[in-house]
Amino acid sequence: MPKADPNRFAHLPLVRGQLIDVRPGRRLSVAVHQGNRDTVVFLGHGSGGNKDQWRELWRNLSEQGYTLVAWDLLGHGDSDKPRDASAYAWDELVADNLAVLKRYAGPRNLYVAHSYGTGLAMSTLLALPRQQPALRIDGALLLGSVLHRPVGTGGLLSLPNWLLTLLRPILAKDFRARAWHPEADPALVDYEDGLAQRNRLDVFKALMNNAQWPDAQALAGLDVPVYVVSGETDGLTPASGGEALARHLPNAHYQVLPCGHQLMLERPEQVLQAFERLAAHC
């Protein structure tokens, strides 16, 4: 299998941000593109990801005049990376999301999220009426989402960080096999795998141990239009889980794409089409 040409990705990252105090003691790298339409699109990545994974959608939507906001979760990308596991508590991450939405929301707002970020997005949307009643999200696109909390790496998450570090090559190989479609561009896979090596395993461990996926019954109150899109060979958030999620949402549409877990990187054109259908529906 051919290796990535390093020059091919020399222009990246495309989605560049700046550190912003979104809440006291919480500094996130936030990228903003100011468009000429009344719609703001919020882009939330998943565990182990970064805001530049939205680069294809960012390029297309900026050309269409949307205002775009993407951020690195705490512990990711260019955001601060505290070592205290309590910094990654679910409620803290949801509060970060609420702060970002409040700061940048416009007359019309759409939320696009991936993987772990979809759980945070759903919890954020459920919290809005109580914590930010004046703020409305008009629709959401959830990529690689599931109904129930994704299972991490089982008993491995109970191991000490130093041992996880020793096991990292095995964990990375397993992630690669489960996350990408067998026919995914090997250069893209190599590039993204290289970025993932910079992620701290203690952050991933804290995220998975602190995850509190929204309760399935609570989702009945999420009445905004939601498009759920799954990858047919996704070994991390299986398509069956995405289909189950769509069945529990009162206003959902469901689609499966011929790809793995990294939908917006493997099938950017089809993800863009799903977004455009959502935007037209809202």
Image (tube, rainbow, N blue to C red):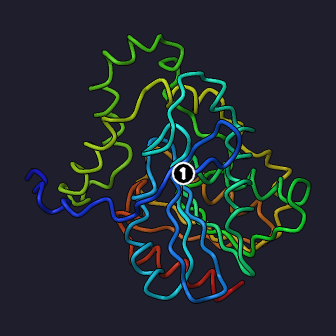
Q: Position of residue 58 (x, y in %)?
A: 44, 72
Viewer-nearest residue: 79 or 221: 79
Name the residue: 60% across, 57% down. Answer: 242
Viewer-nearest residue: 199 or 83: 83
User: From the viewer's perspective, is 251 left or right of 275?
Assistant: right
Quarter-of-image position of residue 140 = bottom right
Viewer-nearest residue: 143 or 8: 8
Q: Position of residue 183 (x, y in %)?
A: 24, 59
Name the residue: 57% across, 46% down. Answer: 116
Quarter-of-image position of residue 275 = bottom right
Which residue bears the numbered disc 1?
115
Q: Position of residue 177 (x, y in %)?
A: 31, 42
Q: Secondary structure at mark 1?
A: loop
Q: Position of residue 220 (x, y in %)?
A: 85, 59
Please rate how many residues cluster around mark 1, counting C-alpha atoms within 10 Å: few if below 14, some from 14 to 19, many from 20: many
Name the residue: 19% across, 55% down. Answer: 186
Q: Number of numbered discs present?
A: 1
Name the residue: 23% across, 51% down. Answer: 191
Does 205 appear above or below 281? Answer: above
User: From the viewer's perspective, is 118 left or right of 128?
Assistant: left
User: From the viewer's perspective, is 176 left or right of 120?
Assistant: left
Q: Quadrant of the C terminus?
A: bottom right
Does 70 appear above or below 173? Answer: below
Q: Amino acid at mark 1?
A: Ser
